[in-house]
Amino acid sequence: MTLPPTGSGDDGPPTRRRLHRAEIAEVREKHRIRLRRFAGHGRYAEQLDRPIRVAHLTDMHVGLVTPFKVQLAAIEVTNRERPDVVVITGDFVCHSHAYLDELGWLMKRIEAPVFGVLGNHDYWAGGAEVQKALKRAGVEMLNNANTTLQIGSQRLQLVGLDDAYTGHANRRKALKGMRKDLPTLGLSHIAEEADALWDSGVPLVLSGHTHAGQLTVARLNEWTIGRLAKHRYIHGLYGSRTGEEQPGAVYVGAGIGAAVMPLRMGDRGSREVTMFELGVLPGDLAEHHPEQAAHAPAPDTIDEDEERAAAHARFLERKAKKQNGWRARLKARNQ
């Protein structure tokens, strides 16, 4: 398959062709795209007359690092499952605006209503521009907001928390007007925000950001994402869907794309499309893995908000230096 050109406008629009079934199978096998299934929180079974199927994608990272056909194959896999709704939990882009045309074209291929929240890479690339491209493609963005969608005769409430890594999360704003009597699903790029959402009546939160560490052999991801990046939720299902031990659960998706290197090793680090059957009780369907305990933070863990703010400040400083360098070179060239 010919890869689509960049969205810079110099080479024309992306290739507008779906993948054939054989191509999807080939891409899935070569690039290790897994389809994983989970039941929802037990509370949904009490609130719903029939299951609602939610497809979860995260960290698409449309850009130079990940082949476009991988992201397209993930969309085709999603469509074949006929979900009632698709949610995407941030990092739509990689490092720049150069691929916004590709991103929009890709989002339009999804054959179900799409809702999303932004991630740190979206803000680093330019949150306003990314959001405009997504809205043009029909994606409803939940920037610290909640909404209710009608699925047949049933309703599902979505709560979207803006990216916490770059300091844009506002839980109070996101929860304003939320109804406690409706089945509610939370979206947050950063999984650690789930704890407070559980306490506010959101029983299940879907998230991303970590890519599961990408390299999960010999539990390497627990070192890189757990001890070094200091995340308590690395990949998969955490918490409780019965409300017995904890008031809720969070799922951290392994994502589809990458921002630095595309290499992935180990089952848990594979790219994934995840289906959640809200209204099906845990234990009533075969799942990839059971709920697991959160990883203990490293002894030298500092305040999460402070650490995120410091990391974001370091990124902005590096970005400013690069921009100043480009301006200086351009100025020297024009003199």
Image (cartoon, helix red, strand yellow):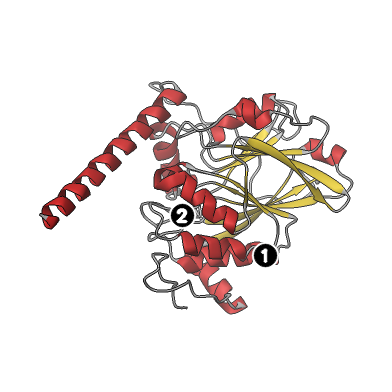
Judge left or right: residue 94 versus residue 248: left
Q: Quadrant of the C terminus?
A: bottom left
Q: Is residue 252 left or right of residue 281?
A: left
Q: Earlier in the sequence, mark 1 or mark 2?
A: 2
Position of residue 164 in the picture relative to residue 42 (left or right)? left
Residue 61: mark in rendering:
2
Name which residue type carries label 2. His
| Image coordinates for residue 10, horizontal then vertical, percent | 36, 71
Confirm or deny contact between disc 1 and disc 2 (CB under 8 A): no
Measured from the top left, where is residue 263 in percent x and y?
A: 39, 57
Front-most of residues 76 and 333: 333
Q: In the rendering, at what x and y percent does residue 283 appear?
A: 77, 44
The kind of secondary structure element at disc 2 is loop
Q: Which residue is mark 1?
A: 79
Alpha carbon separation for disc pair 1 and 2: 19 Å
Q: Secondary structure at mark 1?
A: helix
